[in-house]
Amino acid sequence: MIRLLCMNDYNQMYKLWKKSPGVGLRSLDDSREGIERFLRRNPSTNFISWEDGHIVGVILSGHDGRRGYIYHLCVEESYRRRSIGRKLVEHVIMAMRNEKINKLALVAFHDNSPANNFWNKMGWEIRRDLNYYTISLNDNNL
Ligand SMILES: CC(C)(COP(=O)(O)OP(=O)(O)OC[C@H]1O[C@@H](n2cnc3c(N)ncnc32)[C@H](O)[C@@H]1OP(=O)(O)O)[C@@H](O)C(=O)NCCC(=O)NCCS
């Protein structure tokens, strides 16, 4: 079953992230306070997959009124290759369409082959013509 993510899911969700290589966690952004702020701004674009009495997948995504971004997608290892990842992405796409967002983006580590295979299979375009620039506004957000 897929449903909207809420703050009551935080502990279970964070445990799943922690044990999943490929999910790059940030100490401030992914803290309880950071996620609470994010969900307040983006109440309808974050989902969990619930099976066998616990969370087996999470997708964290939001938009700024123009672009939508997926920040974390994660499926528990023993539940992978059962289309849970695909369904979570489909829910985000539907939610973003409802909010009139026209384009989504995400970042995946080069060496994360499962993730890169997944996004290719989902039909997402890899942009080799762009450099991804960031600047940190808080040195504590590692
Ligand atoms: C990437 C991830 C979310 C995929 O979740 P999933 O539920 O296993 O994905 P799905 O079952 O919906 O896969 C859909 C299709 O993607 C492709 N795919 C998914 N995982 C793959 C893998 N490990 N190797 C090759 N192709 C893969 C397949 O074509 C698959 O279809 P198929 O099973 O019918 O062949 C999962 O591997 C994961 O949580 N990884 C760790 C966290 C992570 O790296 N997140 C991504 C950060 S950008």
Image (cartoon, rainbow, N blue to C red):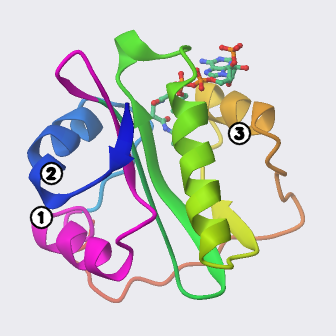
Relative to 136, 123 lies left or right: right
Part of the protein shown in magenta: 27-55
Q: Are marks 1 and 2 in contact (CB under 8 Å)?
A: yes
Q: Which percent across, then down, holds residue 69?
A: 57, 67
SS at mark 2 in the image? helix
**Looking at the picture, does residue 140 appear above or below residue 61?**
below
Residue hosting label 1: 32
Q: Which percent across, then down, holds residue 22?
A: 45, 37
Viewer-proximal residue among 26 and 42: 42
Q: Rounded to the nearest whole Å, what is the CA distance between mark 2 and mark 3? A: 25 Å
Task: Say whether residue 31 is visible.
Answer: yes
SS at mark 3 in the image? helix
Relative to 97, 92 lies left or right: left
Decide which of tag 2 and tag 3 comes sooner along the chain.
2
Residue that appears at 86% across and 57% down: 128
Residue that appears at 15% across and 51% down: 10
Query: In this rendering, which labeled residue sits more in front, label 2 or label 3?
Result: 2
SS at mark 1 in the image? helix
Residue hosting label 2: 10
